[in-house]
Amino acid sequence: MDGKVVDLSAREFTLAETFLRNPGQVLSREQLLSNVWGYDFEPGSNVVDVYVRYLRRKLGTDRFETVRGMGYRLV
């Protein structure tokens, strides 16, 4: 972010770290839920989508790509 300090919550940080450890790799919502929140996928849960939106707002919309029907990836 051009040398700027960005405050992230603990969950946002863990989610960002998960993406950074897997650059370019598509990560499913199930994988992200398991890695970041530590529980199995609930079909009705949109918590991953909400937190990806938070990261996009804080770190830039062009950094996180939605791969339709699969998940998200760090570009």
Image (tube, rainbow, N blue to C red):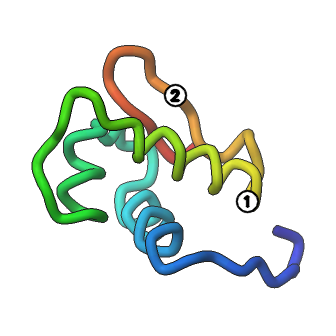
Q: Amino acid at mark 1?
A: Leu
Can you give x and y, in whole percent of width and height, for residue 44 in the image?
A: 28, 28
Q: Secondary structure at mark 1?
A: helix
Q: Please name the residue shown 37% across and 63% down the image.
A: 18
- Left of 65 or right of it: where is 43? left
Q: Please name the residue shown 71% across and 80% down the image.
A: 7
> Residue at label 2?
66
Q: Amino acid at mark 2?
A: Thr
Can you give x and y, in whole percent of width and height, for residue 34 in the image?
A: 18, 56
In what quadrant of the picture does the C terminus appear?
top right
In what quadrant of the picture does the N terminus appear?
bottom right
Q: Earlier in the sequence, mark 2 or mark 1?
A: 1
Q: Please name the residue shown 52% across and 67% down the image.
A: 12
Can you give x and y, in whole percent of width and height, for residue 58 in the image?
A: 75, 60
Can you give x and y, in whole percent of width and height, for residue 63 in the image?
A: 66, 46
> Residue at label 1?
59
Estimate how packed mark 1 is, as few (under 14), some (14 to 19) or many (20 or more) residues with alpha carbons within 10 Å. Answer: some
Give the alpha-carbon distance from disc 2 to disc 1, as whole Å.
15 Å
User: 15 above or below 43?
Assistant: below
Residues 23 and 62: in front is 62
Residues 30 and 39: in front is 39
User: 25 above or below 54?
Assistant: above
